[in-house]
Image (spheres, rainbow, N blue to C red):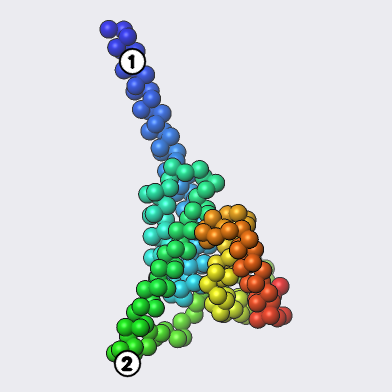
Amino acid sequence: MNACVASFAVSCESGYRRGVSTLQREQELNRFLAEVEKRALRIAEISVRDRDEALDLVQDAMIKLARKYADRSIDEWTPLFYRILQNRVRDWHRRQAVRNRVMVWFGRSGNEDNDYDAVATAPDPKGRTPDEQLQSHEAMQGLEVALCELPARQREAFMLRTFEGLDVAGTATAMGCSEGSVKTHYFRAVHSLRESLGEHWQ
């Protein structure tokens, strides 16, 4: 009888630990998603130029990460999340291309939001003069326009390395390519942006 009681107690303790471990993992994942949400939305919005669509893509990526990769190492979450998000963005562009081809048959253009402002500017730091705020606003607008004009892979490499701060290896995982390709795409993006932005580059 004592052996049965002891066995039951061990089983209960093991279940309790698993429950605590699962709760901790959920809390860690929620913290990660909260931290990454704004940056991911900015990246997606620049990529698709539609805030509502970008929000949907980010939420889809978060759901997939939580469902399929919650048990992975915390260090793996960032590149995995951005790989999911970039795949969602590419799928979105493919769907838009198909939609645009279909709409041609009806004599309509698929680009009906020509006056859309791609990304809201970043919040202004405290203590800046109006002139400094205006210069920052103009520089940010210039960057957004220049990013939209880059080839998709160059844009991905630049935003993941610059906005999210991923290293070359993490960017390669997120983009699903080699580290050498990341370096090439990033170098070309920086070169193009320097030429496009001129005095606003810094």
Q: State if disc 1 and disc 2 touch (CB < 8 Å).
A: no
> In the figure, is residue 42 to the left or right of 63?
right
Residue 129 appears in the picture as rendered:
no
Asked which quadrant contains residue 111, the reply is bottom left
Spatial CA span between label 2 and label 1? 74 Å
Judging from the image, what secondary structure is the residue with disc 2 in?
Answer: loop
Label 1: few (<14), some or many (≥20) within 10 Å? few
Query: Looking at the picture, how far across and down is residue 167, in whole percent?
Result: 63, 56
Q: Is residue 199 above or below residue 92?
A: below
| Residue 38, placed above or below residue 73 | below
- Residue of label 1: 7
Identity, as a three-letter code, of the amino acid under mark 1: Ser
Is label 1 in a helix, a strand or a loop? Answer: helix
The front one of 194 and 100 is 100
Q: Position of residue 67 (x, y in %)?
A: 37, 49
Number of the label disc, if any, that sits on residue 107: 2
